[in-house]
Image (cartoon, helix red, strand yellow):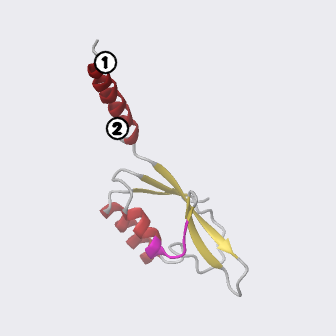
């Protein structure tokens, strides 16, 4: 086989493999980290190695994720009070709607 034709075929095969791997929707774990160094607890959302101080900044990140991505959150049942999203059913409903609007599969694992 001619070298340039072989390179074209090899490039096409590699591109197909990369597309099929990237086409798989990602699954991210969301965590809420409590910070107790301040007079009152502070909270940071964490996905992987990225932290977000507000729901708004978390939503900016989520808006960049590809459609079909799963965001899984298992916050547990222990609360200190004032946790973002968890302390307000209305805020949680709005966040869930935001995820739906951006075609993100938000999975809230109830504690129990």
The percent coordinates of residue 46 (x first, y second) are 57, 64
Q: Is residue 19 above or below residue 5?
A: below
Number of on-image labels: 2
Q: Nearer the viewer, residue 63 or 73?
A: 63
Please state if 54 lies on the left or on the right of 96 as rendered.
Answer: right
**Residue shown at the point (64%, 73%) measured from the top left:** 79
The percent coordinates of residue 81 (x first, y second) are 62, 79
The percent coordinates of residue 70 (x first, y second) are 43, 52
The percent coordinates of residue 23 (x first, y second) are 35, 41
Q: In the rendered view of the protein, which quadrant contains the N terminus?
A: top left
The mark nearer the N terminus, 1 or 2, is 1
Q: Nearer the viewer, residue 7 or 42?
A: 7
Please state if 31 lies on the left or on the right of 95 as rendered.
Answer: right
**Residue shown at the point (40%, 69%) measured from the top left:** 60
Q: In the rendered view of the protein, which quadrant contains the C terminus?
A: bottom right
Q: Which residue does the numbered mark 2 point to in the structure image? A: 19
Which residues lie in the magenta part? 51-57
Q: Which residue does the numbered mark 1 point to in the structure image? A: 3
Q: Quadrant of residue 74?
A: bottom right
Q: Quadrant of residue 13?
A: top left
Q: For the residue labelled by badge 1, is the local secondary structure a helix, a strand or a loop?
A: helix
Q: For the residue labelled by badge 2, is the local secondary structure a helix, a strand or a loop?
A: helix
């Amino acid at each position: 086989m001619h070298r340039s034709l072989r390179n074209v075929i090899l490039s096409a095969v590699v591109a197909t493999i990369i597309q099929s791997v990237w086409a798989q929707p990602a699954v991210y774990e969301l965590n809420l980290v409590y910070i107790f160094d301040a007079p009152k607890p502070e909270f940071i959302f964490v996905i992987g190695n990225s932290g977000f101080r507000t729901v708004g900044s978390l939503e900016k990140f989520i808006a960049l994720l590809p459609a079909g991505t799963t965001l899984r959150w298992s916050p547990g049942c222990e609360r200190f009070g004032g946790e973002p999203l968890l302390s307000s059913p209305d805020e949680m409903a709005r966040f869930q709607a935001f995820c739906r609007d951006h075609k993100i599969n938000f999975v809230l694992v109830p504690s129990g």
